[in-house]
Image (cartoon, helix red, strand yellow):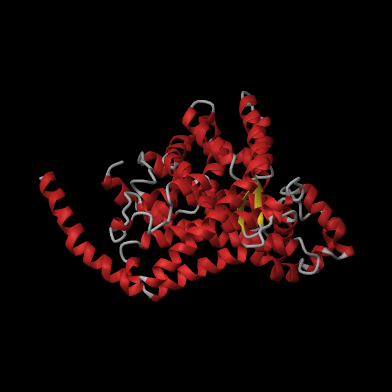
Amino acid sequence: MSLTSAYQHKLAEKLTILNDRGQGVLIRMYNIKKTCSDPKSKPPFLLEKSMEPSLKYINKKFPNIDVRNSTQHLGPVHREKAEIIRFLTNYYQSFVDVMEFRDHVYELLNTIDACQCHFDINLNFDFTRSYLDLIVTYTSVILLLSRIEDRRILIGMYNCAHEMLHGHGDPSFARLGQMVLEYDHPLKKLTEEFGPHTKAVSGALLSLHFLFVRRNQGAEQWRSAQLLSLISNPPAMINPANSDTMACEYLSVEVMERWIIIGFLLCHGCLNSNSQCQKLWKLCLQGSLYITLIREDVLQVHKVTEDLFSSLKGYGKRVADIKESKEHVIANSGQFHCQRRQFLRMAVKELETVLADEPGLLGPKALFAFMALSFIRDEVTWLVRHTENVTKTKTPEDYADSSIAELLFLLEGIRSLVRRHIKVIQQYHLQYLARFDALVLSDIIQFLS
């Protein structure tokens, strides 16, 4: 990718804008799903007895509803058309926004492919993260859309009322109705659409491999490496904690799992042709039973993946991998995370004690504080996600932790230390930039010239 084409197309800016917009659309789909699944908050005319024939007719004929020749079926809609328009406008416009969001996402993905962008989380962190976030957000929007049971009725009824009131249907209805039909089986349609993007998506995901393997180490490996310990090597206590991939050190494991699971669901072709993709995918499948789409809405990782791959030819081995990975998660992951939480309680307690006693160490060792916060967050969110969703297990104790409050207390302790001594961190790194980084940069520039 040439820098000129990247700047000319403003790819980073578009990714940022679309990710923000996608989050807004996703929240609205969540709210519609939540509202329509509860009889207390459902639009009132969806519960009226007199409206039932109209609702059945709209659902059956959607999207080809003949308003003018169906007065016997749509009489109740005609009587309440103004009220229906008033009540359903926000719902309908939210569905239209999904359609427009989809158009802009595919326009940008195609531009990125045409520019032959290279994604590597270790080189262009923000660009790669934004790209993978957009794919996950877009997929989550479509999956939530397909989970709204009344979507056809809401869209069809609004269009009927619009035609009765204005003499013509809404201009967006034809395309919107077709989109809703296409995503009745969302993953099947999404995998067809993402086929051309496999190279870019798989390249971005493969750049996570080393990082993901390292972040999935067990408590024993952490203990052997004396992770987060400031006193394990006293002579190096004031040496700055460095990393070539600083932002990656505290990237959420749950975020990476979403990228990998959804990325390989959409671009599954590379799983049969690339052994590295297979290794990363299988490792991810062995980490969690559920990943979060938004709030309490989750994706049941192994079931969804197995259902999709079972319908595809040549994926027998991948289906076997899924079943094997699910057994591994059920048998081992609860204890694996329990041991990690036990280690973090001890390690972070030691870290907090040292930093509280010598806050000046927050300058060179700020990275340790952020890593501790990140690791605790990962373990707490994993436990919450699985406690809420795992219903049948032979080891329920693996999904309950009576000491979780202590971990949250330590998290708050580290957070408070960082906030209280933020000027120490700022002053240290300003001096570091001026006295060390500037000299190194000068040497690099001279070498380049």
Q: Quadrant of residue 24?
A: bottom right
- Is 408 on the left-hand or right-hand side of 371? right
Q: Residue at x 52, y 51 (%)?
A: 255
Residue 103: x %, y % from top left: 51, 50
Residue 386: x %, y % from top left: 66, 52
Viewer-closest of 237 and 286: 237
Residue 26: x %, y % from top left: 59, 58
Q: Where, quadrant-wise, is the N terminus in this rendering?
A: top left
* Count of numbered marks: 0
Q: Quadrant of residue 266?
A: top right
- Is 332 on the left-hand or right-hand side of 377? right
From what the image shows, is residue 316 above or below residue 360? above
From what the image shows, is residue 29 above or below residue 285? below
Residue 44: x %, y % from top left: 80, 68
From what the image shows, is residue 335 above or below residue 92? above
Q: Where, quadrant-wise, is the C terminus in this rendering?
A: top left
Q: Report if residue 432 is visible in the image.
A: yes
Q: Residue at x 46, y 68 (%)?
A: 414
Task: Identify the residue at the far right of this view.
Answer: 49
Q: Quadrant of residue 29?
A: bottom right
Task: Identify the residue at the far bottom of this view.
Answer: 420
Q: Report if residue 171 is visible in the image.
A: no
Q: Residue at x 58, y 50 (%)?
A: 339
- Is 428 on the left-hand or right-hand side of 409? left
- Is 394 on the left-hand or right-hand side of 101? right
Task: Identify the residue at the far top of this view.
Answer: 314
